[in-house]
Amino acid sequence: MKQSVIGTKTMVVSPHYLASMAGSRILQQGGNAFDAAVAISACLAVVYPHMTGIGGDSFWLCYSSKDRNVRAYNASGRAGSKVTIDTYAGESVIPFRGVRSAITVPGMVDGWDAVLREYGRLTLAEVLEPAISYAADGFPMTKDQHAHTLNNFALLSGTPYTSGIYTPGQRVPEPGERFVQSDLASSLRDIAAHGRESFYTGKLAQAITGFLEQSGGLLTADDFAAHRGNWVTPVSTTYRGYTVYQMPPNSQGFVGLMALNILEQVDLKSFENGSYEYYHLLVEALKRSFQDRNEVLSDPDFCRIPLDKLLDKDYAREMFGEISMESALAPAVSKPMGSDTAYAAVVDEEGNAVSFIQSLYFEYGSGVVAGNTGILLQNRGSFFSLDPEHVNCLQPNKRSFHTLMPALACKDGKPAILYGTQGGEGQPQTQTAIITRMIDYGMHPQEAVNEPRFVWGRTWGNDSQELKLEGRVDQRVAKRLAAAGHDVKIVNDFDGIMGHAHAIRIDDSGFLYGGFDPRSDGLSIGW
């Protein structure tokens, strides 16, 4: 079993080894954590195209050692100004795939620009260089990308422009085969030369919106030109001496904080890690938190979200009182959620830290590549409800309920743990498992990530209320969970359905421990 990498000055973790190497390279070239993070983000958009891309969104938690505070950047897009519930008259849901699912402006490129302008040391062209190289010259197809391409072959091979890139000659490239994205390389070069304006008002904006207009799409040039992400204040709570930060709504980040507030009511260390009590308490705390999330989460510009109540410690005590140690709560029914996502984190030798996450929503997003740009468009907007009474109902210029939630925990005012994962509704679940294993059980990141995991409910686009447990969970524990009313299903020992989680921990001596998920193609690099 892999052990945590330990660095004395820097640490990079990501779900793809080439992206981790790109971030490390930028640090060695004199860039800081923010430069490295954007380089990693761009590389993931190239080498992990089934999980993320520049046609998607991102969220950033940034700690500046100079300012000594944590700030958040919301780089998620809004629905088009002409997209309404009436647009889908006669349909019960927004399509999950195709051009009519691509109804929110991609926010990622704006996020790169914002982070570099605020904190970066290098130019956008310098940090995009590794991504451009991998797109133009190619990289070895991973087993993970190969498997996801096979699973989505009908969509990819049947969609113009998309098919020529991802299923050339109506076949799936083999693992280890060189995978080249020439059109995407050209788009990245244009962004490197002309900045964010290329994507929102310039050449690429014209190409994307022109394609959408010809293809029956719903986003316009005005929608792209109007897009701006924004710096926001993170939401936070305390947990056993740590201050834990998450993205505010429209992110579901507060769910992870609610679960920690509930779990703080009990001494987890009094139960063995991996015991029935451990899994049952985590699942029940999360299910109870999901109940509130489902009622209130959407764009806070369009609805009131009572965070003061939801994150109140007294309220957590009330919720804890609703949990029985012997039986499972009735499930909080959620809409099935997509989960193609990539999480990464960086800490540099100055103490700057970035915890960030990005996504196209479903695997390969909408499945639509915008003409000759090589850019896959996200389908995040398909999560909007068409029920006008629903809190997350579709409205023009509205941001959707977002599953993405990078996390960062500080101790004594400085970053101590950076952590996150892919996995839709699984994100707060896996995060809670990782942070409790590190804080309550004293594990280093790699140990915490390696441990058997669980995921409950409707994620990966599935309609299910199962409690999925990896096969390494003690069978006696699994049987007791089933007897308590959990709908237990045993999956593989290291199952991809658990997501790809990564973490960095900074100890009291300043050493940096990195952990990447063995379920991914990732890598931790520190020195």
Image: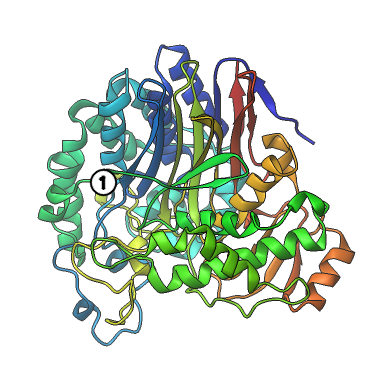
Residue ID at (42%, 50%) = 359
Front one among 181 and 442: 442
Image quadrant assignment for residue 71:
top left
The residue drawn where x is 84% and y is 64% is 477
Observer able to see residue 175: no
Q: Which residue is mark 1?
A: 372
Q: Residue furthest right?
A: 476
Q: Residue furthest bottom?
A: 90
Residue 404 x %, y %: 44, 53
User: Vertically, is 482 above or below 452?
Assistant: below
Image position of 212 with respect to 48: above or below: below
Tell me residue 237's x, y (percent).
50, 48
Image vertical order of residue 169 relative to residue 329, above or below: above
Q: Residue at x 82, y 78 (%)?
A: 483
Task: Tell which of 277 and 40 is nearer to you.
Answer: 277
- Asked whether residue 246 is in view, the answer is yes
Give 436 or 56, whichever is nearer the viewer.
Answer: 436
Q: Residue 299: which quarter of the image?
A: bottom left
Residue 332 location, x and y as percent?
55, 76
What secondary structure is marked by label 1?
helix
Q: Say whether residue 295 is left or right of residue 389.
A: right
| In the image: residue 257, left or right of residue 116 | right
Residue at 75% in and 42% down:
441
Quadrant where the N terminus sits is: top right
Q: Amino acid at mark 1?
A: Asn
Residue farthest toward the front in the current orientation of the protein: 314
